[in-house]
Amino acid sequence: MTPNVKLARDMADELDIIKNPGKNAYKKFEILSNDALSSLELYVLRLESSAGAGDIKEHHIIVANYQQLQDIEKWFSEEKDAIDLIVIDEAHHQAAQTYQEIIDYFPNAKVIGLTATPFRSDGKRIEGKFVYKYSFNEAIRDDVIRNLRVVNVAPEQVQLEFTDQDRKTYTLKQVLDLKEESWFRRGIALSQDCCDSIAQKAREKLEELRTKFPQEQHQIIAAAISKRHGRENVKPAFEKLGLKVGLVSSASEDSKTNDENFIKLKQGKIDVIVHIGMLGEGFDHPPLGVAAIFRPYLTLNPYIQFIGRVIRKNGSTPYSYVVSHLGLNQLQRFEEFKMFDYEDQEFMKELFSENDDMGDRSFVDEVEAGKAGSSRQRDDVPVIHEIGDNTLVFESQFVTDPRIAVALSQFEQLDKRGKEAFLKKLGIDPRKVSLRIGPKEVRVKPVEKRKASRNLLNEREKSIATDILKALTLKHYGRDFNKLYLNFTWVKKRVSKTLNQKMNIQSGQRKSITNAMFESMEAQGLLKGVQEENLEYFTSKLNLKRK
């Protein structure tokens, strides 16, 4: 059993000695000899719509995502002895009702659970006995996975602009006091300045990997809060740097686009894959070498799942990077991750029981609900700007390299006691961190900035169309205005036309928009006016039609 369709597909392929005679798991790990494989009768069935209950009796291994097994009797018809062994991949999902119903349906079957995070998402220990544990630390030292280097950027100061237009500048020391506040973390995540800083540092680390290890392919995986955050903040932050970006989400309507972006990722045609609730578990693509965190993970489980995407072996590349912003408070997650690997399980059980995954889910729900959407007034979130000419960079790694000297002396603004207190506020050991100060990089080619702005304009028009339909309680795929066009397509067409009129350009002339014109558009708040005007227009059209 696996938690999703993609993992089920991959698992079935790994176990199928007929479909994959040269690449199956038995051959790869030398479990069975070539002679045994050529004569063995071992049939694998992946449960999907084309399979039937009768197929089960003729196959020896059944692979399914647990949603396929929700109607367990449809497949097994009271044959409670049909299964001898249940193997649960990503077993921290064991708390799910469907999982437990399947386990209970086969009372005589043995159960094996496999997971990199051996606590359920509700903080409780997975039922059963630990029979084998292989720590991340051991795997790094055995060269099975890559070492992790963690980099967090921070400006000298940040400026908060609240809805009443009052502005207040906060020093880095004050930022450290605020980083525990959820409203502040949300503001950091939605700040384009902060997203740009993360993207700049992620690109720097990507270029480092490509320069030092040119024989391998290297790419970035980025975690966004929501589709809107990914489209309007994260994606343009990378596009301004000249990187090719693909975006995938767990939304069902994005399945076709997801498949296209997966193909481009595998082919190396994109540099960055931005994911929203899609690639946290089990996704295996070794070229991913930089994990860029643009959202605060409030608990350890999803954090481990995400950074696990960049630790796969990639040729001779010995390490990978995790990049984030200091204001997102992710250094604490990294320290918990290291404790998770070393400390006793009772300690970790307490940690997980205090912090369940619902914290992460509720944060995402808030943003998806539009409370912090970029195209409407953010009443509960300040607009955050980075100021100052310097950037502070905090670096740590999972397995500490003894050759790296502690560089605390570089932090000249504080005395020794102040430095230690400063780092302890971050939850990190001063002996295991490198801290340096350097000039803030703002290297964006004007042509790339213009291309990114044009793409961003299209994404914001999509958001405006979505908001209008939501306000009117209409479905994207309905045809309430024009029988020839879907609601979303029809509304977006008019939104684009209205914006073109306000910018004094014709249809098809978007390439002529300059950076100065984009900046003027933002300063004048044209998008807000476009949304209000079109909402009024479509409301009147809908009222007339209903009359």
Image (cartoon, rainbow, N blue to C red):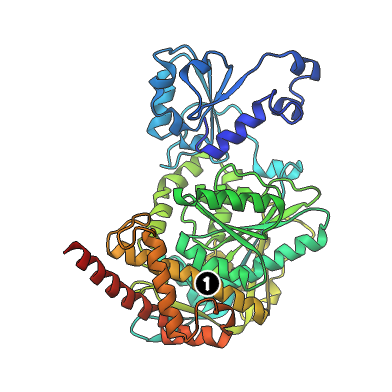
Residue 193 position, x and y percent, is: 54, 76
Residue wearing tag 1: 456
> Looking at the rendering, which quadrant does residue 43 occupy?
top right
Q: Residue furthest front?
A: 484
Residue 457 position, x and y percent, is: 50, 74
**Residue at left 48%, top 76%?**
174
Residue 487 position, x and y percent, is: 36, 60
Q: Residue furthest left?
A: 547
Q: Nearer the viewer, residue 311 or 181?
A: 311
Q: Secondary structure at mark 1?
A: helix
Q: Nearer the viewer, residue 212 or 230?
A: 230
Q: Nearer the viewer, residue 44 or 464?
A: 464
Q: Nearer the viewer, residue 391 or 133?
A: 391
**What's the amino acid at mark 1?**
Leu
In the rendered structure, the answer to whether residue 271 lies left or right of residue 225 reads: right
**Residue at left 46%, top 83%?**
522
In the rendered structure, the answer to whether residue 303 lies left or right of residue 391 reads: left
Name the quarter where the C terminus is drawn: bottom left
| Residue 544 visible within the image | yes
